[in-house]
Amino acid sequence: MVAQEDVLQSDFDGDGAVECLPNGTRLCHGQYTIVRFLSSGGFGFTYLAKDSLNREVVIKECFPTSLCRRNNGRVTATRADKLSSFAALRDAFLSEARHLARLKHPNIVGVHHVFEDNDTAYMALDYIQGQDLLDTAEGQDAAFGPYEVVATARKLIRAVGFIHDAGLLHGDISPDNIFINLSGEPILIDFGATRTTTLESSETQIFSIVKDGYSPHEFYFHGGRSGPWSDLYALAASLYHVVVGAPPTAAQVRMARIAHGDGDPMLPLVGRFPDYPEPFLASLDKAMSPFPAQRFQTAHEWESCLHQHLDSEQTDMKLFRKAARKKPPEQTESSAHPESAVPETAQSTNASKGTNMAIDIAELTEISGFIGGCLVDSESGLMLASELVGQFDLEAAGAANTEVVRAKNKAIKMLGLNDHIDDILISLGAQLHLIRPLEKNPSMFLYVALDKKAANLGLARMQVKKVEKTLKL
């Protein structure tokens, strides 16, 4: 794994090198100290800094080099006729930064301070350690396979929808602006192009960031009608790069070829990548239509499409079989064949002790009053491992508790909480159902069903937490 600044670091030559803040510069009355320059873009500079408590943060400075310059530390317009444009951009930067600071979501970088200094604007963001999307997909981590790509995509779709629900557009989604942190969670970063919008029309923007391959056609010309569908195109294009291993054809090239009567030069994904479920590939094709009206119009529409076509046991088990082959269990007589590494049904026996699964949760059976237990991914509903004693409908219980965890995660997002719930306890007749979302990935959870008379709840919680710490996902 590498740190965020190693990914963002770029050569920075020419006149701009003089304009960026030198190391050691103090901002906001000494609250932040610049450690070093990270990157530059059309809207300004990004730095690694430390706050007054010696914590690492990322500082973004509003400094459009086409409009301003630095004069004795102060930022001023390059010419008198640029003054109003620079002031408007600075005000927009402050306004949108304040909007972003209110976005509390596990898959969106946190903006925790917005301030003015040196006659320009700044925002302080969370410092993310990890790799960008492409480095993760192209790295040596075999665990990031088709199943993980689909799960990551669904989290990002929800995060983008959260941004849109707040009346904002990201405006610069690309693989280098999607980080996979050390816990495996995707994080959207770099909101330099963010602007307010409504679902009907977008406000006039001062600048537009265009990235060939990822930007939709409407970003290339003045007056292009951008909206949520534009961000969805860029997200789909970023995921396309992961699936194909190369960026998609630039939207301008696609439109030119179509207008010339040659047809779209970019081949559909459907039918070409058997490791991925066809509904997922079809959704990328739709989101990347060169014509905005033919795309998903909202993230909720895209998410609903995937939920309808992907959330079935057949698709989930197919994906998990592929993931299991990448990280097989130790070879035994029962695990010599890859297909046996994944249970065909949700049930196993106590005698198996988890040896027929890629993930071992057998220690759950040691809990007093244990009836059944499993590890479930609430994003897909996939049961990753299971243990069972006697007759019990573990599959139905796992599905029901998946809805509980989904509702819990939705509530946390709606309330804007930066927290998680350790345990959920449900009493059902003679049974207790104990649900524990994983600390490293709250969308996954361990679940155990216990006999109410025989169970020691305190010890059960300790044992479930112990099993959680031993999981290698």
Image (cartoon, rainbow, N blue to C red):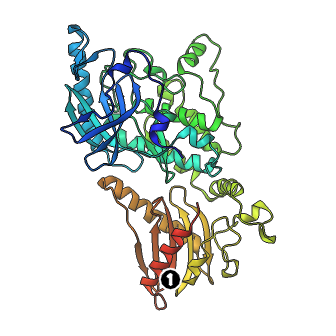
Quadrant position of residue 390: bottom right
Relative to residue 456, is residue 125 depicted above or below?
Answer: above
Relative to residue 401, is residue 185 depicted above or below?
Answer: above
Q: Which residue is drawn at 65% across and 50% down?
A: 142
Total numbered labels placed on residues in the image: 1
Relative to residue 209, is residue 407 depicted above or below?
Answer: below
Q: Residue at x 49, y 31 (%)?
A: 234
Percent of width and height locating residue 116: 20, 32
Percent of width and height locating residue 373: 56, 75
Depth check, front residue: 78 or 411: 78
Q: Residue at x 54, y 32 (%)?
A: 237
For residue 197, say whether it is visible: no
For residue 233, say whether it is visible: yes
Which quadrant is the C terminus positioned in? bottom right
Q: Is mark 1 on a helix, strand or loop?
A: strand
**In the orientation shown, which residue stands out farthest toward the bottom?**
453
- Label 1 crowd (10 A; few <14 / some 14-19 / many >=20): many
Give the residue type at disc 1. Leu
Residue where numbered disc 1 is placed: 450
Depth check, front residue: 462 or 1: 1
Percent of width and height locating residue 316: 62, 56
Percent of width and height locating residue 57: 34, 43
Depth check, front residue: 228 or 275: 275
In the image, taking residue 332 as reference, residue 14 lies left or right, namely: left
In the image, taking residue 397 as reference, residue 224 lies left or right, namely: left
